[in-house]
Every structure is written in structure tokens, then in C-alpha cells.
């Protein structure tokens, strides 16, 4: 089936308040299956639910169910998924309706956190990243624009005001917001003029699959948008716990030889994006905790944490607590490298 033959429905039938089993049963009843399928939930998403469709005992399709929230817009997710497949870095879209999409299952092994620290693996990820950033010409419909600093500001504002779902109680971490806001402003000021490109904007190890041929494939295009290419690089380096020396190597991998002033500016931006990437995840967890039953329940998120990051507290606060020391270390390094 070619991309043009993917089936699209304009009718939204999935409901946000459905239980995981109700979603599973709806997927099983979709009219697209040409053989019996067994639908099983795959845990790990913070804002969407994922299921695999098994046929004859093997996973054949991945199904993503999500709703507009935070930075994610479902129409942008679908368009980004189509672009990724056209670029050869993501799975083929089979079916889409508002709030639900079906893609081919990506054969391979999931990237592990420690693998991202390997210079050879990092080079392969950066090579794929450059393919993404060169793919803007394939975007055929409107997609989102991603600016992490504004997203963090929105999260922090919600942390101060609270949400209706929890009686407008501010986040227990709200007293940290003034400092985080000052840091966000300072980091943003270091970014120079740039040409927005197609970007992934969630370069975590859990969104990378190593195919049997050894190629890195990207999944989960919730953050797919026009944005700054150095955010993708900085976020990957954040997850890889990269120090300044590794950041220099990564910039050289990405750009090749640069004039001294240009190289310094790119390094400044990468460190700024590396730091804001950590703060974005921390504040997203803290905002989500103010409405923990919006779509993915705390119990579902706990199952994902057990699988992806064993040893951490199996809750939103566990992910925040994992990333907070990383954020503080990155901010300390940033101030040392680029004093005000």
C-alpha cells in the first residue's frame, strides 16, 4: 500500500475518558483489519496510549491514541508521520482518524539509554537527524511550530495557577518557578537568528528503533513541527548525559568544519537547548501531575516507568526527580561555559 492509499476518516469516535480496555476494544473493531488481530497495550507514553496489533502471533501494526494537549496537535502528528516515512526514517501510515492512527510495526530493537552515549551510535543518530532537518520540502499540510522556551513558560504559569481538575491548587513546586523563569529567559537570549526546519522535538532513546539493517528509525511524532534543528541535537545530548567535550564532537558531526565564531555560537545554542530540554521535561511532568487523569492514568504511566526506567519511582514525580539533577548539572555547566 502506498502512502496515498492510507485510509483517512474525518470522524472522531474515540473518547478521552475511555478506559484502556474500551480503547482496545474499539481498535479491535476497526474495519481495516484483513485478518484476526490481537490488540495489546504497550506502556510508556506520557500523553498518549500505544497498542500493538498482533497477527499470527507477531506484532504487525502500532496504534497511537492521543488528544490535543500541551504542545501536541493531532493533525500535526499525522502530517509529521507521513513526512517521516517519505524520508525513510519512520513507519508507513496505514489508517488515521482524529485522535487515532495506525502505522506499520517497526521491526528492530529499542534504543537503550546507555547506547546513546556511544560515539558511533551518536553519529548514526545525528546522520538521521540531518535527514529530518532537510525534509521540510515534504511537509504538505500545516504543522505546529515548536519553541521550547514558550512551552516551558506555559507549563510554569500552570504550575502557579493550578488546574480545574485538582481544584486550582498550585503545584507543590510552584516556589521554584521564579528561578526557572529567569533561567529560561537567559537561555533563550543566546539563540541567534535561524531558519526553521522540520524537527522531531522528542529525541529520547525510547523513540528510536534500531532496524535489523542497523538503521536508526524514529517513532512518536507528537512533537513533530517546524523548529530549531539544534533543539533536536541538544535534547539527544541531554539524554546521553553529554559533557562539553561530547557536545563539541556532536556539533562537529552535524556541521563539519565551521568558522570559529560560528562554531562558538552553535555550541552556545546546543548547550542552551540541552538545558531547556531537561527543564521542559521536568515542568511537563509537574504540569501533568495537576491533572493526572486527563488521558493516560497514573497507573498506566507507572507501568511505562517500570519498563523504560526501572529503579525510578513509578510515577510522574519519579521522572521529574530523575531529570531534575540533570537539569541542575547542565545549568551549572552552562553558567561556567557562558558566564553572564
Image (spheres, rainbow, N blue to C red):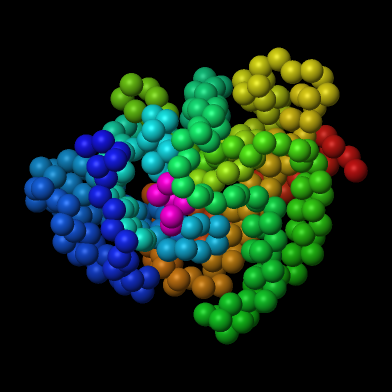
Task: Say which residue appears at 26% left-offset and 36% top-offset.
Answer: 2
- Could you say which is closer to the camera, residue 301 or residue 207? 207
Decide if residue 28 is in sight here. no
Task: Say which residue appears at 59% left-offset and 37% top-offset.
Answer: 197
From which residue to which does the magenta span run? 74-79
Res 48 → quadrant: bottom left
Q: Which quadrant, please, contains the C terminus?
A: top right
Residue 286, given in percent of the width and then of the height, sits at 60, 64
Kindly give the residue lying farthest to the right in the view shown: 340
Residue 62, given in percent of the width and then of the height, sits at 29, 47
Res 25 → quadrant: bottom left
Q: Does the magenta stretch include residue 151?
A: no
Decide if residue 233 is in sight here. yes
Task: Say above or below: 2 vs 43.
Answer: above
Task: Say which residue appears at 25% left-offset and 50% top-offset.
Answer: 7
- Could you say which is closer to the camera, residue 175 or residue 325? 175
Residue 301, given in percent of the width and then of the height, sits at 42, 60
Amino acid at each position: 500500500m502506498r502512502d496515498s492509499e492510507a485510509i483517512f476518516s474525518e470522524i472522531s469516535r474515540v473518547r478521552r475518558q475511555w478506559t484502556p480496555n474500551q480503547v482496545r476494544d474499539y481498535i479491535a473493531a476497526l474495519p481495516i483489519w484483513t485478518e484476526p488481530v490481537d490488540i495489546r497495550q504497550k506502556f510508556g507514553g506520557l500523553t498518549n496510549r500505544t497498542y500493538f496489533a498482533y497477527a499470527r502471533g507477531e506484532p504487525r501494526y502500532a496504534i497511537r491514541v492521543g488528544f490535543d494537549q500541551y504542545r501536541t496537535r493531532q493533525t500535526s502528528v499525522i502530517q509529521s508521520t507521513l513526512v517521516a516515512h517519505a524520508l525513510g526514517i519512520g513507519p508507513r501510515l496505514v489508517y488515521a482518524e482524529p485522535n487515532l492512527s495506525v502505522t506499520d510495526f517497526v521491526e528492530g530493537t529499542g534504543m537503550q539509554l546507555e547506547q546513546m552515549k556511544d560515539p558511533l551510535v551518536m553519529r548514526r543518530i545525528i546522520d538521521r537527524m540531518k535527514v529530518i532537518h532537510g525534509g521540510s520540502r515534504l511537509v504538505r499540510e500545516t504543522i505546529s511550530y515548536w519553541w521550547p522556551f514558550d512551552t516551558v513558560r506555559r507549563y510554569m504559569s500552570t504550575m502557579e495557577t493550578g488546574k480545574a481538575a485538582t481544584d486550582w491548587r498550585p503545584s507543590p513546586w510552584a516556589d521554584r518557578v521564579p528561578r526557572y523563569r529567569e533561567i529560561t529567559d537567559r537561555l533563550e537570549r543566546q539563540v541567534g537568528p535561524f531558519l526553521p526546519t522540520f524537527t522531531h522535538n522528542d529525541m529520547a532513546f525510547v523513540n528510536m528503533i534500531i532496524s535489523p539493517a542497523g538503521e536508526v528509525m524514529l517513532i512518536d511524532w507528537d512533537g513533530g513541527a517546524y523548529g530549531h534543528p539544534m533543539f533536536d541535537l541538544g535534547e539527544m545530548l541531554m539524554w546521553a548525559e553529554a559533557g562539553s567535550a561530547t557536545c563539541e564532537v556532536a556539533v562537529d558531526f552535524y556541521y563539519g568544519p565551521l568558522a570559529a565564531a560560528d562554531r562558538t555560537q552553535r555550541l552556545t545554542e546546543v548547550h542552551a537547548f540541552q538545558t531547556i530540554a531537561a527543564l521542559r521535561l521536568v515542568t511537563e511532568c509537574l504540569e501533568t501531575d495537576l491533572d493526572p487523569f486527563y488521558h493516560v492514568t497514573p497507573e498506566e504511566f507507572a507501568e511505562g516507568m517500570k519498563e523504560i526506567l526501572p529503579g525510578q519511582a513509578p510515577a510522574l514525580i519519579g521522572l521529574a526527580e530523575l531529570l531534575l539533577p540533570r537539569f541542575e548539572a547542565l545549568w551549572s555547566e552552562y553558567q561556567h561555559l557562558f558566564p553572564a
